[in-house]
Image: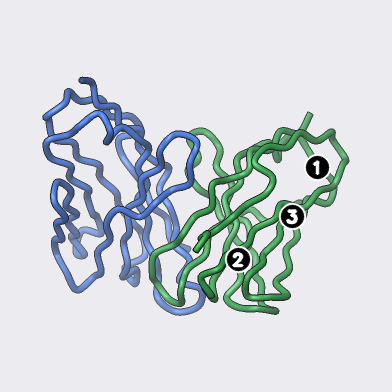
Amino acid sequence: GENVEQHPSTLSVQEGDSAVIKCTYSDSASNYFPWYKQELGKGPQLIIDIRSNVGEKKDQRIAVTLNKTAKHFSLHITETQPEDSAVYFCAASVPGGSYIPTFGRGTSLIVHP
Amino acid sequence: NAGVTQTPKFQVLKTGQSMTLQCAQDMNHEYMSWYRQDPGMGLRLIHYSVGAGITDQGEVPNGYNVSRSTTEDFPLRLLSAAPSQTSVYFCASSPPAGYEQYFGPGTRLTVT
């Protein structure tokens, strides 16, 4: 089955800096790559996603890039703010069957004011 | 829409007790799934369903049962609770095939 590796497990930045979280996946058939943000005490919530026919996608201060050849994708957050502090999960879905995504282990992002 | 709701929010069980975690969604989503979240382990899939009457096992199904009699509800049953089942449990739903998953607020379960 699919295996998703996520790094780093913890990321500490100053407000205004950029943050990058990287993920690799094992199954070259995966074609859907969502990113979820989990605030303390809440369930994860989708913040951005990308499909395999797209190399990059942006939404205001967040962007995701995908390199299908290398089987890795990254989340970029620019001009970080304290409210960006949360746990972020990447995931990958293989088409066919359930499409249930496989999640990475998460990155705890801490933005210091 | 309430989205995905889970009850209870917190639960303490003794080893060997049984209980059911409730999950309901009002978005008419076909797909529903249960995850457990443990520190440093991310979200691990327990069971999932692609429609009423259809369920399948995920990565960590042992000790848990599910059924899906309606589109809206997907309860998770712990038959004989063990301390290893202490975790935070999330239910999620999604429209078919590779779309956004909507998570509930979670149930924090402690087994002593």
| Residue found at x 73% / y 37% | B11
Write the residue at 63% across / 75% down: B71
Picture residue at 52% right of the left edge, 59% below the top: B2
Residue sticking out furthest to the right: B16
- Left/right of residue B11 with respect to residue A90 in the rendered view: right
Q: Chain of mark 1?
A: B
Precedes in sequence: disc 2 or disc 3 = 2
Tag 2 residue: B48
Which residue matches tag 1?
Answer: B81
Vertical order, A82 against B90 (above or below): above
What colour has chain B? green
- Secondary element type, mark 2: strand
Q: Which residue is mark 3?
A: B64
Q: Chain of mark 3?
A: B
Whether residue B43 is situated above or below residue B75 in the rendered picture: above
Question: Which colour is chain A painted?
Answer: blue
Mark 2 or mark 1, which has the lower sequence index? 2
Image mark count: 3
Callout 3: SS: strand
Q: Residues within 10 Å of mark 2 (few under 14, many from 20)?
A: many
Q: Residues within 10 Å of mark 1 (few under 14, many from 20)?
A: many
Tell me the kind of residue under disc 2: Tyr
Quarter the C terminus of chain A occupies: top left
Residue occupying image coordinates x 59% and y 47%: B36
Looking at the image, tell me whether mark 1 or mark 3 is earlier in sequence order.
3
